[in-house]
Image (tube, grey):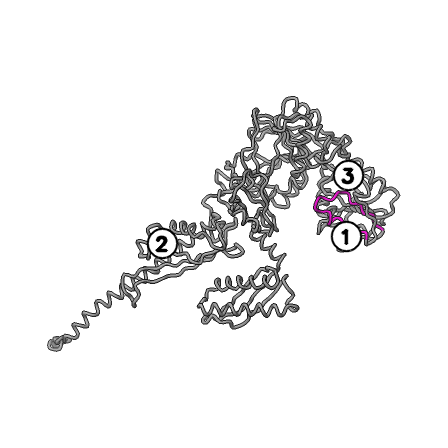
Amino acid sequence: MTYFNRKLMKRDIPASATVEGALVIPVILYAVAAVMFLLQLISIRMHVNDALYNALRKFNTYSYTSQVMTGEIYKSTFFAIFVDEIGSDYAKKHYIAGGNTGWNFYGSDIADDNSTVKISLKYTVKNPFNILGKRQITIYEKRITDIWLGEEKDGFESNNNDESEYVYITQYGEVYHIEKMCSYLVRNIKAASLAEITDLRNASGGKYYPCSLCKGASKIVYYTDYGDKYHASDSCYALQRTILKVKKEKIKGMVITHGHEDHIGSIPYFLKQINIPIYATRLTCGLIKNKLEEHKLLRSTKLVEVKQGQTITLGKFRVEFIRSSHSIPDSVALAITTKAGTIVHTGDFKIDYTPIDGQLMDFNRLAEIGNNGVLALMSDSTNAERKGYTMSEKTVGDVFERLFQNCTKRIVVATFASNVHRVQQIVNSAVRHKRKIAVCGRSMINMINTARELDYIKAPDNVFIDIDMIKNYTDEQLVIITTGSQGETMSALTRMAAGEHRKVEITPNDLIIISANPIPGNEKLVSKVIDDLMQIGAEVVYSALADIHVSGHACQEEQKLMLALVKPKYFIPVHGEYRQLMAHSETAKEMGIDKDHIFMMTNGRILELNEKEGKLTGTVPSGRILVDGLGIGDVGNIVLRDRQHLSQDGLIIIVMTMDSNSGTIIAGPDVISRGFVYVRESENLMDEVKSVIKNEIAKCEEKHITDWSTIKSNLRDNLKDYIFQKTKRNPMILPIIMEI
């Protein structure tokens, strides 16, 4: 048992102890208040950070980044988004000095290359208690994010999904869009004065020219970074876009007129976005099938083979496939029956009275449709500037025959892979003169294999040999059919001419026949190939020396015959440059079509027709979808601009190591140049660049700037000005800072 001494338990409490106890309570309360305030600060910062993230996501996604003025973003725009995210009454409830006006987005801007947006936020939290002599605490927040370019970033996901009932489409686009605010659909329209526009340059460095479609004068004009026109009105249809909202199921199918690459090349990319049936003739289906197999889409695609003369129903439309003539078999024109009337689309055509396959254009059916009444004709305008008739494909066969006759050299023929009739005539001449045929070039091999399988190219089984077997035959026993008639950089004929082809070596004992006219813009490439071949000693025959090419498109007299057969109420020239469309419209006037019934269309225009009238009513977005490697549409304007910048001005890389505590340079700076100057021959310039870098770092040290992004931005700005002053060039500058 334990005993306690009661006397020991009873002690006198001095007065000083009472005072100490009285002081403890305020200290505890002060500490609790301080902890609560710190917890409040942590909570505020977390909420602010979340609001900044969401606001930046919306800012970037919905293309508000187009609102750029001398490198500064319109802070009012971002401010409104931020306040909406954080809550309009949040600042008042949480003792933010100044309320909503206390959110100060100082120094916020967009990077020079428009790739990132930087947000700097300063705000002050009032302290109800005087802790450590501070009645308020100022907080700084910084965020740098990539500008959204059409792909999903930072985990952002659309509120909609691919099974959405409604989608947004463009008339000439190849994809549909879930979000109306997709960056592909949204145009970044800017305004400037007439005086300013003369000094401005687009993203490619080109000048802006007045739009020929805008009516009226204006002191303020409108433009885009990637256009080359300025507009008197921001509602000009060449500037604005009209977006069509449709139900997925309203897109019933795709109808193809023939198998040339410019008509079927984009199909796989379109089908990756929306899977619809495809209707085409036998050979066209075969060529499309090859593309679908390559893209692993064949099993998931409904490919419907139709015959010339057949009619199908797509929704409320009836589409008839009319036999036509072109440079590829199985070409068709289309007669589309609607409630408003019949629309005839010629497709690509020529009138050949002696076609290689013996299949004349179905003039009778075209005349019959014309007699029944045609609301509108859409007709091929490629050769609208050429008078007379296009020569028959058989005339080329006669030239081949003359060239093959008594020739003891090896014959190499370059032509378009898609010109099946041309290939058939080469085969015919080779067979008659007992020559074996080797095929070179991937597209040519694919085309000939498909055409032979479907019996569109007829030849004895033993005529074709593998390219590896040519060494087993003498020159007079061989014909090589190859790609490269347009001088394409990596084509088979170009590599032969450069001596870089692995299997075919050109010698003076070769006869080279280039059976194609240069496409406008390819003249220099073709001329170089011809020069290279002649320098080797080969004999070269091309269009200037012999009639070894005829067009697959109608000239003026054939276009007149089409107009006479169809007798349309309205006429729309298609498939040509604007000058060719104009020439075709003049031909239509000669044939009695009222000028008010002829519509000169540009990509994106909407034409509405009925029995009483036709009128232009608006626009839809139009443009190109870029395919780069495996990526589809993911090469945006900024990436293209960077590539152009690098190709024209080169790159400077600055590498240095900094102390994380002091901010001083420990190692470097080292300057690396690629495509700008040769460093060994520009040592003085490199030394001066290093001096500029060191001076700028010293300035940052004096101002106690330790933020990397700010340092990098200052370095880029100063170096850009200095290098341009010294060299009149503007290379891309990439600072790399390592911290230890």
For discs 2 and 3, the disc positioned in front in the rendered view: 2
> Label 2 belongs to which residue?
101
> Label 1 belongs to which residue?
496
Query: What SS does tag 2 mark?
Result: helix
Residue 72 appears left or right of 730:
left
For discs 3 and 1, the disc positioned in front in the rendered view: 1
Q: Earlier in the sequence, mark 2 or mark 3?
A: 2
Callout 1–callout 2 Cβ contact below 8 Å: no
Q: CA distance from mark 3 to mark 1?
A: 23 Å
The quadrant holding residue 437 is top right
Local crowd at mark 1 within 10 Å, few (<14), some, or many (≥20)? many
In the image, is residue 164 above or below residue 73?
above
Give the percent coordinates (x, y) of residue 614: 57, 28
Give the percent coordinates (x, y) of residue 460: 80, 40
Q: Which mark is residue 638?
A: none
Query: What SS does tag 1 mark?
Result: helix
Quadrant occupied by the N terminus: bottom left
Residue interval drawn in magenta: 509-534
Callout 2–callout 3 Cβ contact below 8 Å: no
Local crowd at mark 3 within 10 Å, few (<14), some, or many (≥20)? many
> Label 3 belongs to which residue?
424
